[in-house]
Amino acid sequence: MRRLEAMVGTSISPAVLGVALLIRLALIALPPTLSDDAYRYLWDGRVATAGFNPYREAPDSPNLTPLRDELWSKLPHRTVPTVYPPFALSAFSIAARSPLPLPIWKLLACVADLGACALLLALARRSGLPEARVAWYAWNPLVVLEVAGMGHVDALGAAACIGAVWALTIVPKRPLIAATAAAAGVLAKLAPLAALPMWARQSRRPWAFLLVALGLSGLALAPVVVSVGGLPPGLATYGVSWEWNGPLYEPLWRGLEWAGAGPAAHAALDAAKARTEWWTFWNRFYPYAYPRFFAKLLLAAVALAAVAVSFRERDPIIGTGRLFGRLMLTSATLYPWYLLWVLPWAALREERRWLLLAALMPLSYVPALFGVPLWPWIYLAIWAPFALFSLLGKRWSPS
């Protein structure tokens, strides 16, 4: 990257953006063969534009029978209502109403991603970092594949988060711009909620930041909560049931199973019932007394601790990278496109372990493509080098 910057001199920004544009355009026509999420986005958009509630109506709902066609036949998880927040759903609806839904959706995702690249270049200039580092993100094969090729909605949320950090860094006297961008990130995907306390602390007017960010998010999310009478069922299903390639989760739940955590929990519940004779009360806990759920609870506590620790971060770039990186590590589900939340900050700070992980993460597609198990060898091929770099290398250096 330093050689590239020396070669092109002051024209580094146009070079980075120009190449980023070309490689994304080359992949827009690629069918989403590695992930079927884009089909679900378009279906949810179609349901919303037809006047139904996608937070209540799963694709298999009889009420949606008139909408079924070839798109419906490609959908994943037809029994689960949508998990995507209102801003994402609005973008899906725009694409669903267009003459070419899939290319238009992927084009929207690419526009957001290119905007993110432009903001990263501005951040690099303001922070005194080499602009060429942005190429680690803008030209990253994983980013291009997951945004332009597979069309993942994370591009919208990541771009909004980059916008929030850009505003905190470059226009610090106007924290409401950062708060609005943060709310857009939350409404594209809920992950940025975890960063709001840290970003508020880093702004010059913390309470105004939180009021705007939470207020805008709440105004958009309140109708969803009211319409389903609480937590959206799709989101609850995701939190309890989804799991794939979690870096800490995979070995943790297996360790708990080996240690007999499930039978021990059942024995404890049996003893509590016998001692208290509250049969109905204790019976409700049995469905959750198994190692996978215990692992998720433990990692959720670690994730909350990561959010609390992030409150002390002073640098928005380093703090955001650290926080999202820690949340990735504690997640029970880590698909390749989830790295879009970490890679922008890893690129600016040359966090080589995360850049290496981006190169290795496509291995997680091998089980679905070739019918082999993820655990243990593919998992180790992905995560062992990352762990080694984490032990030996510098992490989130300020230089």
Image: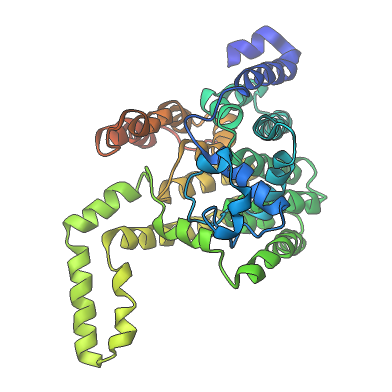
Point 74% across, 31% down: residue: 122
Q: Residue 293, image x and y in percent?
A: 34, 62
Residue lying at the far top in this picture: please name it.
Answer: 7
Residue lying at the far front in this picture: please name it.
Answer: 66
Q: Could you say which quadrant of the image residue 125 lies in?
A: top right
Q: Residue 383, image x and y in percent?
A: 34, 35
Q: Residue 15, image x and y in percent?
A: 70, 15
The quadrant of the picture occupied by the N terminus is: top right
Q: Nearer the viewer, residue 81 or 232?
A: 81
The quadrant of the picture occupied by the C terminus is: top right
Point 65% across, 28% down: residue: 129
Q: Could you say which quadrant of the image residue 197 lies in?
A: bottom right
38 shown above or below 307: above
Residue 341 appears in view: no
Q: Nearer the viewer, residue 126 or 370?
A: 370
18 shown above or below 195: above
